[in-house]
Image (spheres, helix red, strand yellow):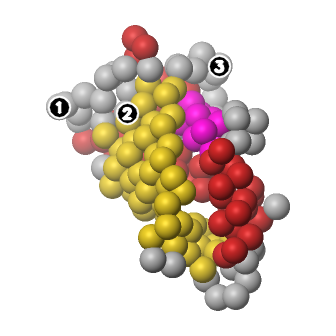
C-alpha cells in the first residue's frame, strides 16, 4: 500500500534543514527514531486491538520496533531521509513494515514542505478487503502521526 502525506511547516528552509539534522542524529530523546517508533507502536497497538480509531479497549503491550534511518542527503534543492520500520524479534514478518522517504523542500521564503512517501507492506498474503482497508487506514494514521511530530520539531 502506497501512502503519501505532506505538511507545510512554519520554518524557513535553512533552519528546518539544520533542525532535521539534529532530530535525525539525536539519541532516542527527541529524535526521529523515537518519533518513528512511537508512531509505529501506536498503530500496532490499534491493529492488535482491532481498533483503527485508537479508542476503546485496554492498551496492548507494544512490540519491539526496529527503526532504520539514512540521511539526510541533499537532492537538488531538497533534503531527504530514508526510513524503514519493522517489527523485531518474534513479531518479525507478522506485522506491517514501512519503507519511506521523508523530503523537505522550501515553500516560499518562510515555510518548508515536509512530504512523506512510503510503501506499507502488509504482513500476510491473502488478506480480506476489509483487513486491507484497515491496514491502509492504520498506515495513513501512522504516517500522519509521524509527520505532525516532525513538523512540530522543525517549527521549534
Q: Which residues are magenta?
A: 32-44
Is 142 on the left or on the right of 90, as rendered? right
Residue hosting label 3: 58
Q: Report the magenta stretch's main SS.
A: helix
Count neighbours of disc 1 (C-alpha within 10 A) and say few if under 14, some if 14 to 19, many if 20 or more. few
Task: Identify the residue at image location x=64%, y=88%.
Answer: 108
Task: Identify the residue at image location x=40%, y=11%.
Answer: 90
Residue hosting label 1: 126
Residue hosting label 2: 96
Q: How far apart are the two marked residues, 3 and 2, measured between alpha carbons?
A: 21 Å
Above or below, 86 against 82 in this view is above
Count neighbours of disc 3 (C-alpha within 10 A) and say few if under 14, some if 14 to 19, many if 20 or more. few
Q: How far apart are the two marked residues, 2 and 1, measured between alpha carbons?
A: 14 Å
Question: Whole-percent x and y of residue 91?
Answer: 40, 17
The answer to whether any part of residue 46 appears in the image is no
Which quadrant of the structure image shows residue 21?
A: bottom right
82 and 53: which one is in front?
82
Element type at mark 3 = loop
Amino acid at each position: 500500500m502506497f501512502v503519501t502525506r505532506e505538511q507545510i511547516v512554519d520554518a524557513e528552509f535553512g533552519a528546518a534543514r539544520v533542525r532535521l539534522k539534529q532530530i535525525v542524529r539525536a539519541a532516542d530523546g527527541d529524535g526521529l527514531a523515537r518519533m518513528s517508533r512511537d508512531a509505529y507502536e501506536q498503530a500496532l497497538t490499534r491493529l492488535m486491538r482491532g481498533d483503527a480509531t485508537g479508542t476503546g479497549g485496554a492498551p496492548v503491550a507494544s512490540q519491539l520496533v526496529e527503526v532504520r534511518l539514512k540521511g539526510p542527503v541533499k537532492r537538488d534543492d531538497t533534503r531527504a531521509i530514508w526510513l524503514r520500520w519493522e517489527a523485531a524479534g518474534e513479531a518479525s514478518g507478522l506485522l506491517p513494515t514501512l519503507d519511506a522517504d521523508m523530503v523537505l523542500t522550501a515553500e516560499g521564503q518562510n515555510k518548508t514542505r515536509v512530504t512523506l512517501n512510503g510503501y506499507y507492506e502488509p504482513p500476510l498474503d491473502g488478506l480480506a478487503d476489509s483487513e486491507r482497508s484497515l491496514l491502509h487506514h492504520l498506515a495513513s494514521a501512522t504516517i500522519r502521526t509521524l509527520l505532525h511530530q516532525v513538523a512540530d520539531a522543525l517549527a521549534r
